[in-house]
Image (cartoon, rainbow, N blue to C red):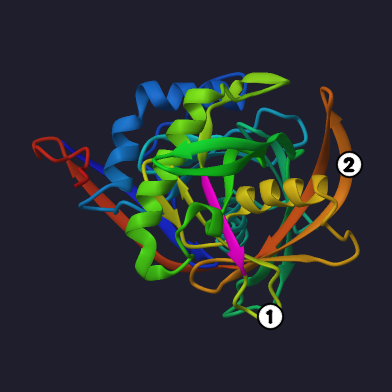
């Protein structure tokens, strides 16, 4: 038996997004967390097949559209990566919105704003439309209003070998350990990525050993997603440079949307965020996202910001992947 998966691929600020548009069964569930749990149990073999080699690679990222769970949402979206299914993805929202509007998979009427249900909550993605190409719309950028983002704990001392470094734990749709690269002892350079991968995973494991991280309003949102290393920007217009190591040592080529929201929450709590100046976050490859605080809220007893993150995505291809039931590597592999 041959199973076919059709995808539309894009990248947002350099980070890939593979949106599966045919071949994935529709996840069942009353909430998006329920749908994510259903996907883990019933279609995880398809996630592995389309994310890992020979069809994908270690740093591939993906998504599927689902039925919405909120009356005001246009669609639901589940995100996937090399290790499983995530709660929210900022670059993914930018890419999904771009694909959905340019390929007319979802059309929000006269508006260019999509309301998307995610496991972390509803996000609003507002597209700026450019000149039409061959009669089709072109999305020049997407600004998404994220879920409330907040600091869980600042300055957690983490010891690795002889080095002790302060780590901030923050939520931006997923939980991150945020570390200054100088304190970690590894500069944010492309040639140091093997070290950053290993160190990011070690920091994540050590933080999870000493802290159990759970969202105060929903214990279905728990566990550390990854480590964000921050450092001085190289682009003249950027404020900070970062690289995010997440899932199973996956590297985000973009500035990381949910990570940008988490970093903004930390900067705001430190009193370093200037609300009338957009925050420009730079990736390891020099691409940028722009963040703004558009609201404030309290999550349980914690102050939280409502961040809006803006970036651009480009469609890179359309594919039909074949999964042969007799193939011993049909569910993918990684080395």
- The residue sitting at 82% across, 43% down in the picture is 305
231 in magenta: yes
Camera-side residue of 222 and 199: 199
- Asked which quadrant contains residue 255, the reply is bottom right
Magenta region, main secondary structure: strand
In this picture, is 7 found above or below 233?
above
> Vertically, is 258 above or below 218?
below
Q: Secondary structure at mark 1?
A: loop
Q: Left or right? Give the position of 79 relative to 201.
A: right
Q: Position of residue 13 (x, y in %)?
A: 55, 67
Pinpoint residue 177: horizontal percent, then vertical percent. Answer: 57, 41
Q: Which residue is mark 1?
A: 131
Query: Which of 5 and 295 lies nearest the eye of the viewer?
Result: 295
Of the pair 109 and 174, the residue shown nearer to us: 174
Range of the magenta residues?
A: 227-232
Q: Is residue 88 visible?
A: no
10 lies above or below 160: below
Q: Residue drawn at (63%, 59%), measured in percent from left and top?
A: 101
Residue 160 x, y percent position in the rendering: 43, 40
Label 1 neighbourhood size at 10 Å, few (<14), some (14-19), many (20+)?
A: few
Q: Is residue 31 visible?
A: yes
C-alpha span from label 2 to label 1: 35 Å
Q: Which residue is mark 2?
A: 296
Q: Secondary structure at mark 2?
A: strand
Disc nearer the start of the sequence (2/1): 1
- Whether residue 290 sits left or right of residue 270 in the image: it is left
Query: What percent of the width, then of the height, locates residue 90?
Result: 61, 51
């Amino acid at each position: 038996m041959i199973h076919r998966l059709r995808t539309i691929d894009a990248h947002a600020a350099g980070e890939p997004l593979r949106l599966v548009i045919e071949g994935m069964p529709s996840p069942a569930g009353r909430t998006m967390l329920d749908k994510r749990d259903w996907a883990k149990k019933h279609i995880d073999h398809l996630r592995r097949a389309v994310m890992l080699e020979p069809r994908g690679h270690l740093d591939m990222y993906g998504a599927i559209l689902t039925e919405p769970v909120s009356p005001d949402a246009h669609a639901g979206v589940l995100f996937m990566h090399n290790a499983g299914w995530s709660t929210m993805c900022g670059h993914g929202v930018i890419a999904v919105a771009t694909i959905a509007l340019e390929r007319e998979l979802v059309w929000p009427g006269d508006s260019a704003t999509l309301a998307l249900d995610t496991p972390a909550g509803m996000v609003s993605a507002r597209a700026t439309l450019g000149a039409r190409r061959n009669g089709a719309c072109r999305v020049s950028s997407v600004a998404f209003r994220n879920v409330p983002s907040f600091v869980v704990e600042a300055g957690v001392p983490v010891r690795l070998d002889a080095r002790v470094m302060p780590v901030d734990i923050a939520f931006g749709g997923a939980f991150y350990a945020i570390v200054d690269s100088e304190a970690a002892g590894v500069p944010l350079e492309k040639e140091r990525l093997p070290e950053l991968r290993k160190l990011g995973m070690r920091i994540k494991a050590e933080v999870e050993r000493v802290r159990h991280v759970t969202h105060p309003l929903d214990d279905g949102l728990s566990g550390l997603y990854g480590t964000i290393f921050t450092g001085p920007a190289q682009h003249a217009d950027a404020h900070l440079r970062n690289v995010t190591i997440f899932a199973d040592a996956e590297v985000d080529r973009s500035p990381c949307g949910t990570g940008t929201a988490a970093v903004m929450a930390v900067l705001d709590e430190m009193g370093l965020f200037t609300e009338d100046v957009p925050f420009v976050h730079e990736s390891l490859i020099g691409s940028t996202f722009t963040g703004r605080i558009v609201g404030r809220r309290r999550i349980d007893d914690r102050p939280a910001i409502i961040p809006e993150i803006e970036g651009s995505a480009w469609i890179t291809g359309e594919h039909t992947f074949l999964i042969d039931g007799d193939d011993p590597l049909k569910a993918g592999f990684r080395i």
